[in-house]
Amino acid sequence: MYKIAVFASGTGSNAAELIRFFNEKNEDVKSVNNTENRSRNNTYSEVTLVVSNRHNAGVLLQASAANIPIWIVDKALWNTPAKVVSFLQKNGIDFIILAGFLWKIPLELCAAFPNKITNIHPSLLPKYGGKGMYGSRVHQAVLEACETESGITIHYVNENYDEGSIIQQIACPVLAADTVESLAKRIQTIELATYKVVINDILTNI
Ligand code: GRF
């Protein structure tokens, strides 16, 4: 089995959808009539760990509901990347999915999981990425710049915020009447439909 760790700091909508997609074991759901499940790979992958830097992150409720072990990291631990790498390796983690994780990934962790850490960002990188650009700040900046399109970027992770090589981008229109909330909702819908499929494709070809 291929073991996935999901790292998240916030609500966990993306994490919940990834957990649902990869961990659903209900045979009825896997029936041949279910097109989503038909597209899954033969190598069985499962989310076996949720990592967060926040004790009260919503994602922890998602992990608990799915009976997935949780690991809370603090700054002292994060500043000792060898310990982080060692914990993940001891737990047999093969692949790391960032889903709204706000801390920078240290070089040692990137090196231990080459091309095996992905992130999703709610804009068309390299636009509106980098330190401090997350959540509504991204959409606010897009609206203030009067962009006519925005979208999502799924990319491999390196030691800099939002800079690793791009795997997939999907654009969507920014409408004249858009608010931060309406744009965020349009982009979240694309994120929830896309991230799991892209990861599944990667794991199929690994
Ligand atoms: C998403 O918009 C994702 O693009 C970004 O963080 C957000 C996480 O949202 N990296 P949620 O916690 O999955 O709702």
Image: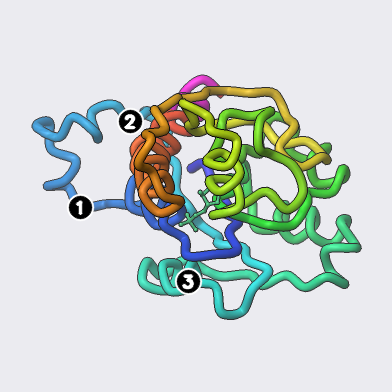
Q: Quadrant of residue 117?
A: top right
Mark 2 or 3, closer to the camera: 3
Q: Is residue 177 left or right of residue 160?
A: left
Q: Which residues are magenta?
A: 201-205
**What separation in Å lies between label 2 and label 1 (alpha carbons)?**
14 Å
Residue 91 picture location, percent across and down: 65, 58
- The residue singled out by tag 3 in the image is 58
Give the amino acid at mark 2.
Arg
The residue that disc 2 covers is 40
Q: Residue at x 75, y 32 (%)?
A: 163
Q: Position of residue 153 (x, y in %)?
A: 55, 31
Query: Circle 1 sits on which residue?
Result: 26
Amino acid type, callout 3: Gly
Which structural element holds mark 1?
loop
Q: Amino acid at mark 1?
A: Asn
Image coordinates of residue 65 in percent, x first then y, are 36, 72
Label 2 to label 3: alpha-carbon separation: 27 Å
Alpha-carbon distance for marks 3 and 1?
25 Å
Name the secondary structure under disc 3: helix
Mark closest to the chain's N terminus, 3 or 1: 1
Asked whether mark 3 and ligand 1 are closer than 8 Å, the reply comes as yes
Main secondary structure along the magenta-highlighted residues: helix
Q: Residues within 10 Å of mark 3 (few under 14, many from 20)?
A: some
